[in-house]
Amino acid sequence: KQAAKLFSLSTLQSFLSKKYQISFAISLSAIQKLYEAGYLTYPRTNTEYLANAEKEKIAKVIDKIKSDYGYLDIKIQDKKNIFDDTKIESHSAITPTVKLPNIFDLEEIEQKIYKSVLDRFLSNFIKEECILLEKEMVIKVGDEKFSISGKTVKQLGYLKYESEEFTDKVPDLNVEDEFDVDFKVVEKTTTKPQRISESKLSQYLKNPLRKLNNIETDDEEYKQILEGIEIGTEATRTQIIENAKKNKYISEKSGVYMLED
C-alpha cells in the first residue's frame, strides 16, 4: 500500500482540520510562519508532487534528517507518484528543508504542523514497503452469497510514521464449514447529510463542478470548459471562507458550517 501523496496547501490544511481541529485561518498563519523561518518549502502550492530536477535537493534534505533526527530508514525514491513534472504548475509540494528546527522549541500548533509535514515526507521516502494481507470469505446461504473481507498488516512500511487502522472481522471458519444463520429484518431511518466541514468546503472550492465533471459525454468542448474550473486559488481560499464568515453569509460551530438566517 502506497503512502498518501505529499501535501499541497489545501490537503495539509484539511489534514490539520480533521486531525487537530485547527481552522484554515490559524493553520495558514502558522504554515506561513514556518516557511518564513526557513523550515518548510513554499506553502501556497496546489500540487502534491515534486519536480525531477529537485531530486538532488531532496537527497540533501534526507541526509540532513538522517544525521540530525536519526531517521535512518529513509532514502531517495525515484517514483512517479513522488516526482512528476507533468503534475506541477508553478510550485512543488510542501516538504521540510535542510534547515531543521528543534521541534520542541516551536509553538504547539507549529509543532503539529511541522511534524505532520515531516511524517508525510518520511512516509514517502521510507525504504520499507507497506504490505497488507487481505482475505475474503464467501458465505453461501441457499442461492445467495455474502462476502466478508479483512486486512492485517504484514510489514509496516510507511505506517511507522502515519498509522492507520485496519479491521479484520472475518470469522474463524474453514472452507466447507456449515453453521446456522439467523436473518432479521432491521428497520432504520435515513439521516440528513452532515453539515459541511471546512475541509469539505475547501475541496468544493477547488472543484465546484465535480458532479458535472463525472457526467459521461462525448462533447470535448464541454469537457474542456469544465476542466480546471476552481473558485479562488490555494493562496486565497482560506480568505474566501473567512470573508464569507465575516459578512455573515455562513457561520461556523464546532468545526462545521451552516448558512446564516
Image: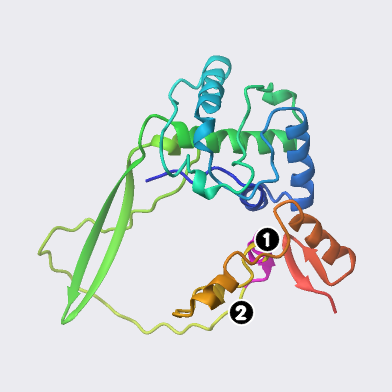
Residue at x-position 67% and y-position 32%: 40
- Residue 16's x, y, as percent? 66, 47
Position of residue 180 measured from the top left corner of the image (x, y, whole percent): 19, 73
SS for dot 2: loop
Determine the secondary structure under disc 1.
helix
Query: Which of the two marks, 2 or 1, is nearer to us in this view?
Result: 1
Depth check: give the residue in front, 50 or 28. Answer: 50
Q: Which mark is residue 192?
A: 2
Q: Position of residue 245 (x, y in %)?
A: 84, 64
In the rendered image, which residue does mark 1 sit on?
202
Q: In this rendering, does residue 23 appear at all?
A: no
| Alpha carbon separation for disc pair 2 and 1 | 21 Å
Q: Residue 173: in sight, yes or no?
A: yes
Region of the chain picked out in magenta, as a range: 194-204
User: Mainly helix, strand or loop, the magenta region?
Assistant: helix
Nearer to the camera, 106 or 47: 47
**What's the mark number on residue 44?**
none
In terms of sequence position, does the residue under pointer 2 or pointer 1 come before the other?
A: 2
Residue placed furthest toward the left = 176
Q: Residue at x 70, y 24 (%)?
A: 104
Residue at 60 percent of width and 64 percent of height? 228
Residue type at mark 1? Ser
Q: Quadrant of residue 145?
A: bottom left
| Viewer-nearest residue: 125 or 248 | 125
In this view, the residue farthest toward the front is 221
Question: Which residue sits at x=49%, y=35%?
Answer: 52
Relative side of 117 to 21, left or right: left
